[in-house]
Image (tube, grey):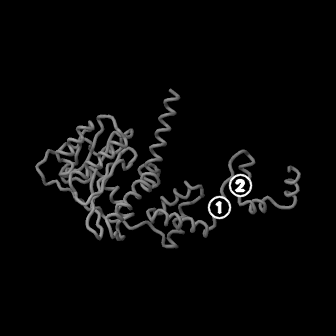
Amino acid sequence: MKYAWIDKQREFSLAEMCTILDVSVSGYRSWKRGGKPDRKRLTDTQMLTLIQSIHAELKGIYGSPRMVRELRDRGFPASKKRVERLMRENGIRARHKRRYKVTTDSKHNLPIAPNLLDRNFSPAAPNQVWASDITYLWTDEGWLYLAIVLDLFNREVVGWSLKPRMTADIVTDALTMAWFRKKPAAGLMHHSDRGSQYASKEFQRKLKKYGMICSMNRKGNCWDNAPTESWFNSFKNERVHGLRYETRAEMAAMSFEYIEVLYNRKRQHSTLGYKSPMRFLNDWLITQQKKKLIA
């Protein structure tokens, strides 16, 4: 086999053989030095096809910055300028953003908790601070309301509930899902707006049962719960605006797919260094395990 390789070297140049084997010359030389061969640079046509495929797969949620990172994560060298040019020339862009509409009903006489969170949106570990909120979704059969519980550490949707009425059970059900999934220790801070659902006796009893500390927005200040509003803005921009849902069941199926399949497991999050919530959490857990072994 050694002599056959020598004969081929005499018959073909290194560049010719690399072309046939679909590797770069620099990649081959790196491999000879003990490194890993580089994937061959894609042509513009190949790169565009890949971009179009990812754009269709993720239903148009990525602009060029996230598209560059997605391509690199999949093992393809991609420069920012090249991806921007190909997307611009071929009309590929992220879905247009719309403003988020506040739906909080804070005109009630129920007790209000102080804003203990105070916009500290970066806890040091998971299951220390959860934030919750509700939004509305229109279908041809009528309204649906979506309540979520977000772990601020890795921005994972740990609990959610979808119902045709915006009553207290929608937020208690979302919280119950989150608790059963994560089983957090007592002392977790739960932050929300001042809406009647979160101030209700039913929800406050549930917080007490789980040993959670209640925190609420200041009056008329939506920025006190900015991460959940940002989540709803992305969700609606990427899956709701400009689309028609004929039935509530269709909306429910889409919501499940977005939260459980795409957002938590795949979608890059800028706050997390362009990692998905699950990847960010797994990387953190691995780091913590290594620290224990060293100690």
Q: Foreground residue, 60 or 212? A: 212
Left or right of residue 1: residue 33: left
Q: Foreground residue, 60 or 204? A: 204
The residue positioned 57% from the left and 60% from the top of the image is: 78
Amino acid carrying label 2: it is Ser
In whole angstroms, how far apart are the C-alphas of marks 2 and 1?
11 Å
Amino acid carrying label 1: it is Arg
Q: Foreground residue, 93 or 3? A: 3
Percent from the top left, x then y, of residue 188? 30, 38
As helix, strand or loop, the secondary structure at mark 2 comes to: helix
Q: Which residue sits furthest top?
A: 295
Q: Foreground residue, 274 or 235? A: 235
Left or right of residue 277: residue 129: left
Residue 134's tag is none
The residue positioned 86% from the left and 50% from the top of the image is: 1
Residue 26's tag is 2
Q: Is residue 205 above or below residue 40?
A: above
As helix, strand or loop, the secondary structure at mark 1 comes to: loop
Percent from the top left, x then y, of residue 214? 23, 41
The residue positioned 29% from the left and 66% from the top of the image is: 138
Among the two numbered marks 2 and 1 on one chain, the one whose residue lies closer to the N terminus: 2
Percent from the top left, x then y, of residue 46? 61, 67
Residue 41's tag is 1
Q: Residues within 10 Å of mark 2 (few under 14, many from 20)?
A: few
Name the mark nearer the viewer: 2 or 1. Answer: 1
Left or right of residue 65: residue 9: right
Percent from the top left, x then y, of residue 216? 22, 46
- The picture quadrant where one finds residue 77 is bottom right
- The picture quadrant where one finds residue 115 is top left
Q: Which residue sits furthest bottom?
A: 90
Q: Residues within 10 Å of mark 1 (few under 14, many from 20)?
A: some
- Labels 2 & 1 near each other (Cβ < 8 A): no
